[in-house]
Image (spheres, grey):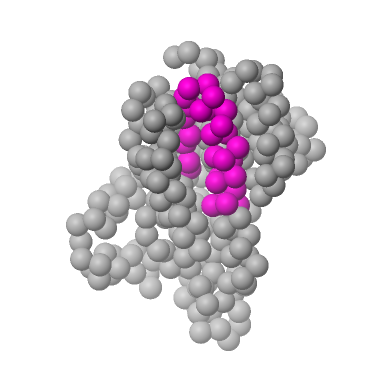
Amino acid sequence: MDKKVILITGGSSGIGKSIGTFLTSKGNKVYGTTRNLNKHTDFDAFELLQLDVKSPESIQKAVSQIVSKEGKLDVLVNNAGVGITGPVEETPHEEILNVFDTNFHGPVHMMKAVLPQMRKQGGGLIINITSIAGYMGLPFRGYYSATKGALGLITEALRMETKDFGIKITNVAPGDFTTNIAAGRYHAPVAQGSAYEQVYQQSLDLMNQHVDAGGDPMMVARKVYKIIQKQKPKIHYPVGAFMQKISLFLKKILPGKVYEKLLLNHYKL
């Protein structure tokens, strides 16, 4: 594979760092991003740039810096994101807006920033990191599911709009992987006396167990590497444990109430 210039948002930890480290080991020039460079002064896996996906100005600055230095930008991996949990009814609206700003509007800002350069150079690849959770509305993770589902649909639309420019767009939907997402996730408080108090707490405990028992994020990195080498990437690439991937197939073939019952049993609701 020819050396690619690759930009990965949220590259300082978790899945983003795994992707960047693996792609660097394959001879690519990788730029990761973080909101605060001062917190990562000893980071040496690949080059980090300061970028906040909620700030179009910082995005444009970082993209211009890469293009000025490298003369091109081959691949954008939209990985930066935040988690959120809570009952739909009780989650503060400012937190709903924040998660959409980061998980949906942020990747859209990124794509708008790189598309002119990719069009100018006659091609490029955008990989949006969505989530298996984006294919279904998960209890007490409804807003997270909504942001990732929205990003998946934008991916489908943008593929068709840019098909004549040589730009390839796809999404990779991870299941549960062992990362620090739970530590940075916003949790709506378990309110004493709430109608959801007991069931929400049980769901929180179960979610954290799933993340702790998750797979190696290098699995996502290897999938991204394979996609970069493809001439015609597919639209969707789910990555995760067998049962997580098969759940997407089951949703396609099962009646809605039957699938809902499976989810209720899985989450012990």
On the rendered image, what quadrant is the C terminus found in? bottom left
On the image, the x and y values in percent for residue 17 come to 59, 34
Instruction: Tell me if residue 259 comes above or below residue 184 in the rendering.
Output: below
On the rendered image, what quadrant is the N terminus found in? top left
72 vs 145, left or right, is right
Q: Name the residue at 57% across, 52% down.
A: 105
Q: Residue furthest top?
A: 2
66 vs 89, left or right, is right
Residue toward you, 261 or 119: 119
237 vs 191, left or right, is left
Magenta stretch encompasses residue 108 = yes
Residue toward you, 240 or 163: 163
Instruction: Tell me if residue 98 comes above or below residue 180 in the rendering.
Output: below
Identify the magenta region: 102-129
Instruction: Tell me if residue 95 comes above or below residue 69 in the rendering.
Output: below
On the image, the x and y values in percent for residue 182 come to 57, 54
